[in-house]
Amino acid sequence: MGKRNQERRRAKKKQRDARQRARTGQEQGFGAAFGSGFGGCTCGDPFCEAGVSGTSVPRPRGPLSVTDLLNEAMERVCAVPLDDTARREAALERAAALFTKAGMGRAVLAAGSEVLHTVWHRGWQPADVVRAARRELKARHGRIAADLVAAEQRAYPAAGLDERWAAQLATLPAEVWWSDDDTYLTGAAAREKCEPTVLGRAWVELLDLLSGLPEIPLLMPPPCEAASPAASGSGGTQAPVLAKVRGLLAKAESTEFTEEAEALTAKAQQLMAQHSIDAALLDAQQETRQAPGGVRVGVDAPYEEPKVHLLQAVAEANRCRTVWSRNLGFATVVGFASDARAVELLYTSLLVQAQSALQAAGSRTHRDGASRTRSYRQSFLTAYATRIAQRLSRATEQATKAAGKDHGPGLLPVLASRAQAVNDQVDGWFTELSYNLSQTRAQDREGWSHGTVAANRAQLHGPADALR
């Protein structure tokens, strides 16, 4: 078994163990962790109210509702250890069989909404949930996760949502496309072109996954809490600055002259760096003491490490820090609002440009016919990240020197104070950091050369609607 395969298996096992600890670390049972709708007693009986009143209530007589049946089925699934394959398979099949019953559409959407309500308070966001479903399960699970998010959001007024939260819902997209909850499963099965039991299994697997998600930093208010201007992190002057940046880089993308394109892209980075400095000085003068925030950026396979190096390069140039949660498939960019937003925008654009260049380059082979495409692309992205780091750092340095001449020696203490605030926020959110990410080695000379050229030509911007 190759070294990278061993690393992947160890990472997967670590994540499974973490999910299992997330379950066992709470009260026993699916419902105990997510509200009274799924039972609340550690005895495992979903109808026992001892967890609330201290006395056991006998199971009611008569036929059980579809909600009761779903609760019991999910209790059984979540009670089985993740490594007990045979028992889990049997529990999943029994739960999936319930999805032929009338009324199950409304029941499963209600059950999922209870789960999501707690998931939001664990720090997860809509994009995180859909990404986790696609990453750990399949594309189908990602689609039904978006359905679940849309259904759950109906409980909250749109005016009370944090603007970043609303932007994620629009990007997914998370829309209620079904006319009635009772007909949801029929419509979803038609969309997925599968039998109700197959769809039911996917739903049970999704709820099981969500029930084991670990707690992560809470980066924005959950939808049940009204957003405030301070919490939204939009920054009143941020939109005009980004509009100017988009205008500069749109010209860079359209010009036929390489020198002009590079000058325009460098100007765009300097503009964002200058905006960051102006914001820092304004906060210092007004003594507003705004706290740093964070955004999550998905880091998908393959070539995760070069992608993280690219993200780190963009973050450092914009006075942010990056923490990579390898097993969860994302990185967290920590910084002040406008800086973190710039990082998210630039990284997404640069990665799209790099991937377009890789696709145009096609595959690569050795003289003997063996493929070297992977080493070529790994080297390409590593060189790309290295060169982008140099370009962005130079632009930021020039902007800082220019601002120092205008504002005098008082600028450096202000920037140092903000850097310390970012470091403190990282230490507060991530108490067990591991600094073992080494520079990815480049093993393909052609890939390194082509990646450097692509970075020199890259525009530090993508389509205006590529990121919301």
Image (cartoon, rainbow, N blue to C red):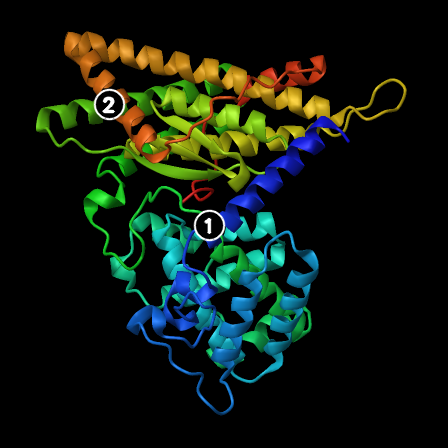
Return the residue nearer the eye: 24 or 282. Answer: 24
Using the rendered image of the protein, determine whether residue 191 is visible from the camera's viewpoint.
Answer: no
Q: Quadrant of residue 120?
A: bottom left
Q: Is residue 160 above or below residue 240?
A: below
Between disc 1 and disc 2, whose residue precedes? 1
The 10 Å Cα crowd at callout 2, few under 14, some 14 to 19, many 20 or more, is many
Q: Amino acid at mark 1?
A: Ala
SS class, disc 1: helix
Q: Nearer the viewer, mark 1 or mark 2?
A: 1
Return the residue nearer the eye: 358 or 107. Answer: 107
In the image: residue 36, left or right of residue 386: left
* x and y percentages locating residue 350 in the rendered image: 51, 29
* x and y percentages locating residue 16 in the rendered image: 57, 46
Q: Which residue is mark 1?
A: 22
Tell me the quarter of the image containing the N terminus. top right
Return the residue nearer the eye: 81 or 128. Answer: 81
In the image: residue 372, left or right of residue 264: right
Give me the disc on residue 418.
2
Q: Is residue 294 above or below residue 194?
A: above
* x and y percentages locating residue 145 in the rendered image: 51, 59
Report how many numbered discs are placed on residues in the image: 2
Q: Residue at x 54, y 38 (%)?
A: 327
Q: Quadrant of residue 438?
A: top right
Q: Residue at x 46, y 50 (%)?
A: 22
Q: Quadrant of residue 88?
A: bottom right
Using the rendered image of the protein, determine whether residue 288 is visible from the camera's viewpoint.
Answer: yes
Q: Amino acid at mark 2?
A: Arg
SS class, disc 2: helix
Q: Residue at x 37, y 31 (%)?
A: 431
